Amino acid sequence: MTAKEALRKKIDRFTEEQAAEWLARIEWESTDVEELTGEEKALVDESQAEYGRGDAVDGKELLHELGL
């Protein structure tokens, strides 16, 4: 069985939701540049503002607070 045949066989068993997820993954992996969505950019900006205000903890402190 060729790779294309095996892939078609697997895809035929996907639900529509699974197919949509894998299509998005394939399209994302095939892009040269990763771009943030508007929502992701807003989260990054919010995080940077929190850090700038000193409202952040480093990884070691977080793990300690979580008891890990």
Image (tube, rainbow, N blue to C red):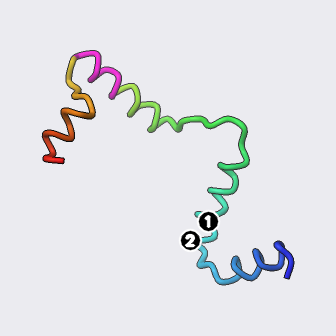
Q: Amino acid at mark 1?
A: Ala
As rendered, which of 46 and 51 lies closer to the eye? 51
Mark-to-mark CA distance, 2 and 1? 5 Å
Tag 2 and tag 1, C-beta contact below 8 Å? yes
Question: Mark 1: few, some, or many residues within 10 Å (few <14, many ≥20)?
Answer: few
As rendered, which of 66 and 39 lies closer to the eye? 66
Residue 46, percent across and down? 33, 27
Residue 3 lies in what quarter of the image?
bottom right
Q: Secondary structure at mark 1?
A: helix
Left or right side of 7 for 14: left
- Main SS category, magenta section: helix
Residue 14, percent across and down? 62, 78
User: Residue 52 has which mark?
Assistant: none
Left or right side of 1 for 63: left
- Magenta residues, start to end: 47-53
As rendered, which of 6 and 27 lies closer to the eye? 6
Above/below status of 22 relative to 28: below
Residue 7 lies in what quarter of the image?
bottom right
Residue lying at 73% horizontally and 48% vertically, measured from the top left? 30
- Residue that badge 1 annotates: 20
Residue lying at 69% horizontally and 56% vertically, measured from the top left? 26
Q: Is residue 35 magenta?
A: no
Residue lying at 23% horizontally and 34% vertically, measured from the top left? 60
Question: Mark 2: few, some, or many residues within 10 Å (few <14, many ≥20)?
Answer: few
Above/below status of 4 relative to 29: below
Q: Secondary structure at mark 2?
A: helix
Residue lying at 56% horizontally and 71% vertically, measured from the top left? 17
- Which quarter of the rendered picture does the N terminus lie within? bottom right
Residue 44, percent across and down? 41, 30
Residue sticking out furthest to the top: 52
User: Residue 17 has which mark?
Assistant: 2
Q: Amino acid at mark 2?
A: Glu
